[in-house]
Image (tube, rainbow, N blue to C red):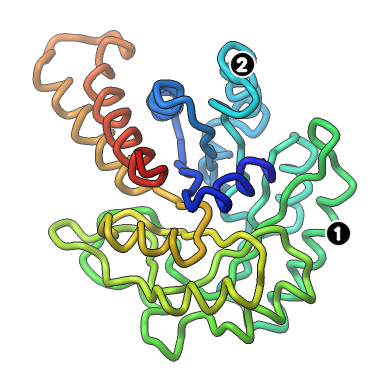
């Protein structure tokens, strides 16, 4: 995964990161990435891991990689997204995740540094394919729910004075030793129904990248404009998280399937439109992130 991210940095592109909570989402993401022969990251939050099963999702991803993955092209990387407890860090490390995001974004800086260091201490002894598991830190609160919303999440950093400061980011990275950093740069989890999200602070991304050097991750990118996302990549973002838009595509596709087949009861016959809608979205995002 580190190699893939470094290649994205070199190419001024970004790894697409998509969250899943069911098999249909995984199938759609894998199909789009395989079509374009690109690596992608599969994210599962604590709730999503509880639903799918932490070992089951690892096995599903492994099975797809075994059949279709190859070096330098298509591969699915697995991220323990938004992990809030140290116990959960240990569970994901033992299960063989490629990456673990320890999310201390709501904590004061001092406590975030302390807890993130402990998370790294837990994860470091574990290896995957002979390589260490990557640990990502989050600095700044951007909300927590991947949902269609009417208002800015309470407490989310959206005002300039609340966004991640370059000097805080530099200290955080130096003292924790994280491999990746997810800053608050105007991004918010979830998306508005009928309007784009507020503009990202591109200058802030550039300033943070300049002082931390390590790869930057953009969370909550559902709802941001294509232009903003490309500018963010140019400024130093190397991975972009999409979840809410994928959930919306699933919901709309499923509603279409149910409407077209009112008497159908076989689950696998009620998901083709949902899978197709999600695959179309993922392909569009991957083409954008990779300038294809």
Residue drawn at the location 27% of the way across and 55% of the way down: 226
Nearest to N terminus: mark 1 or mark 2: 2
Q: Nearer the viewer, residue 160 or 71?
A: 71
Are there few (<14), some (14-19), or many (20+) residues within 10 Å of tag 1? few
The residue singled out by tag 2 in the image is 63
For the N terminus, the image quarter is top right
What is the secondary structure assignment of the residue under circle 1?
helix
Question: In this view of the protein, which residue sits in the foreground, 244 or 200?
Answer: 200
Q: Residues within 10 Å of mark 2 (few under 14, many from 20)?
A: few
Say which element carries label 2. Answer: helix
Q: Is residue 234 above or below residue 284?
A: below
Kindly give the residue lying farthest to the right in the view shown.
Answer: 125
Q: Which residue is mark 1?
A: 121
Decide if residue 243 is on the left or right side of residue 262: right
Residue sitting at x 42%, y 78%: 203
- Residue 177 at x, y percent in the picture: 78, 66
Measure the C-alpha gap from mark 1 to mark 2.
30 Å
Which disc, if any, is residue 41? none
Q: Residue 230, image x and y in percent?
A: 35, 57
Residue 34 higher or lower than 143, as above or below: above
Q: Is residue 213 left or right of residue 162?
A: right
- Numbered disc total: 2
Residue 215 locus on image (x, y percent): 61, 59
Q: Is residue 264 above or below residue 224?
A: above
Q: Position of residue 75 (x, y in %)?
A: 58, 28
Quadrant (top left/top right/bottom left/bottom right) for the C terminus: top left
Looking at this view, name the residue that lies furthest to the front: 11
Observer-nearest of 189 and 37: 37
In the figure, residue 150 lies in which quadrant? bottom left
Residue at 80% in and 38% down: 94
- Where is residue 70, by image quadrant? top right
């Amino acid at each position: 995964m580190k190699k893939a991210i470094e290649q994205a940095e070199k190419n001024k592109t970004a790894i697409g990161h998509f969250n899943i909570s069911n098999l249909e989402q995984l199938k759609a993401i894998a199909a789009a990435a395989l079509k374009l022969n690109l690596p992608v990251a599969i994210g599962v939050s604590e709730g999503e891991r509880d639903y799918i099963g932490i070992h089951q999702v690892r096995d599903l991803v492994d099975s797809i990689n075994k059949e279709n993955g190859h070096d330098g092209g298509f591969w699915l990387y697995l991220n323990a997204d938004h992990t809030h407890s140290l116990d959960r860090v240990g569970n994901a490390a033992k299960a063989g995740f490629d990456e673990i995001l320890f999310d201390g974004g709501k904590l004061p800086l001092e406590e975030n540094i302390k807890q993130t260091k402990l998370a790294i201490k837990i994860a470091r002894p574990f290896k995957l394919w002979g390589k260490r598991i990557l640990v990502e830190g989050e600095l700044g609160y951007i909300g927590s729910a991947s949902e269609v919303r009417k208002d800015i999440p309470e407490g989310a950093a959206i005002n300039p004075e609340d966004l991640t400061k370059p000097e805080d980011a530099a200290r955080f990275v130096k003292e924790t030793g994280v491999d990746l950093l997810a800053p608050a740069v105007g991004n918010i989890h979830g998306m508005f129904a009928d309007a784009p999200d507020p503009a990202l602070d591109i200058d802030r991304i550039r300033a943070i990248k300049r002082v931390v050097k390590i790869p930057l991750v953009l969370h909550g990118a559902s709802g941001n404009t294509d232009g903003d996302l490309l500018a963010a990549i140019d400024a130093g973002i190397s991975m972009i998280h999409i979840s809410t838009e994928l959930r919306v595509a699933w919901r709309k596709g499923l509603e279409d399937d149910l409407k077209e087949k009112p008497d159908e009861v076989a689950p696998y016959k009620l998901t083709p439109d949902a899978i197709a809608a999600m695959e179309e979205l993922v392909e569009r995002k991957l083409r954008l992130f990779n300038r294809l």
